[in-house]
Amino acid sequence: MASIVEVSDATFDNEVLKSTQPVLVDFWAAWCGPCRAVSPIVEQVATSYEGKLKVMKMDVDQNNQTAARYGIRGIPALLFFKDGKIADQIVGYVPKEAIHATVTKLLA
């Protein structure tokens, strides 16, 4: 299984903003049903793009500074970072094709 790393307020800048690879951050919470539904898709993306894309998860209940910094109001929120900036984002549950299409565009 591909490695999905839990990222926190403390490690976010180093892991995400300073990454040489594009990064997908899944903002989620344990109580969120749609987050649980999107989770297997995020895992598939991590496996499909291993070595090309870093995939991270951030629990918004435990790390509200970063969520606030990026204006996360609805979860799940998938933020795609490239060169330390938000390149794209998806909020709410979407089918895996939509996520794969966004990743493909990000890596192009």
Image: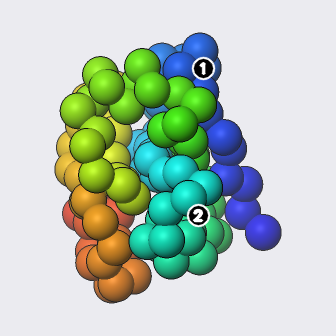
Three-letter amino acid code at disc 1? Thr
Q: Of marks 1 and 2, which one's residue comes earlier in the chain? A: 1
Residue 24 position within the rendered picture, expressed as x and y whole percent measured from the top left: 44, 49
Packing grade of label 2 (10 A; few <14, some 14-19, many >=20) is many
> Is 18 left or right of 97, judged from the image as shown?
right
**Quadrant in which the C terminus appears:** bottom left
Q: Nearer the viewer, residue 69 or 49?
A: 69
Image quadrant of residue 78?
Answer: bottom left
Residue 93 position within the rendered picture, expressed as x and y whole percent measured from the top left: 34, 73
Residue at the image position 29 percent from the left and 66 percent from the top: 92
- Mark identifier at residue 72: none
**Quadrant in which the N terminus appears:** bottom right
Residue at the image position 68 percent from the left and 44 percent from the top: 5
- Mark identifier at residue 46: 2
Q: Nearer the viewer, residue 17 or 58?
A: 58
Three-letter amino acid code at disc 2? Ala
